[in-house]
Amino acid sequence: MVTSEERSEILDTEHLKLLSWAYYVLGIVNALFLFVPFIYICMGLMFMGLSGTMPHKAGEPPPEMFGAFFVILGSIVGMIIVVFAALKIYAGYCLSQRRNRIFVFVAAAVLILNIPIGTFVAVLTFIVLSRKSVIRKFEASLR
């Protein structure tokens, strides 16, 4: 017969494991979106490379600036995607190791912006990490 305390322990372990996997999957899916800014960067480099063959009127900005805009925009968006993907993957690692509970709360707060799946996972994270038994698990890993 399983006691209520053992049942709570099993549920906490399973919930933390599922949340950890959810963060890993969301981080990997987020990283797959790096192809979009990569296309912008390639397009900008193409414009910059072909600018010698493009006609240029006096008083207009050179075609290289148009290409540079695409490269800069793609680079900035790519860096943001990398940061968010790394945040999610590290939060999944923290959940699996029962460390950095506050960091996982911050990651969940950021994850709310990924409507609807991210919001669902973030709400579940808040619920699970607020349990006293889960708090004890994270505190026990500090020792």
Image (cartoon, rainbow, N blue to C red):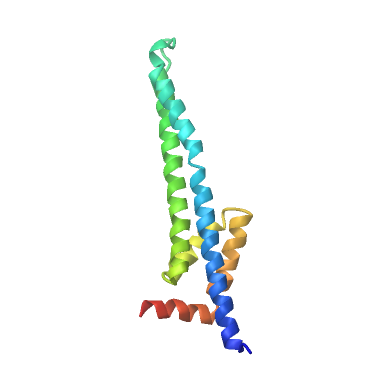
Give the residue at x 53% y 61%.
Answer: 21
- Image coordinates for residue 102, horizontal then vertical, percent: 44, 69
- Judge from the rendering whether residue 48 lies leftward or rightward of residue 9; answer left or right: left
Tell which residue pokes out farthest to the front in this image: 1
- Image coordinates for residue 62, horizontal then vertical, percent: 40, 17
- Judge from the rendering whether residue 6 lies leftward or rightward of residue 140; answer left or right: right
Give the residue at x 57% y 79%.
Answer: 10
Tell which residue pokes out farthest to the left in this image: 143
Say which quarter of the image contains residue 93: bottom left
Considering only vertical position in the picture, is 37 above or below 105? above
Q: Quarter of the image containing the N terminus?
A: bottom right
Nearest to the observer: residue 65 or residue 46: 46
Say which quarter of the image contains residue 139: bottom left
Give the residue at x 43% y 26%.
Answer: 44
- Image coordinates for residue 7, horizontal then vertical, percent: 60, 83
Q: Quarter of the image containing the C terminus?
A: bottom left
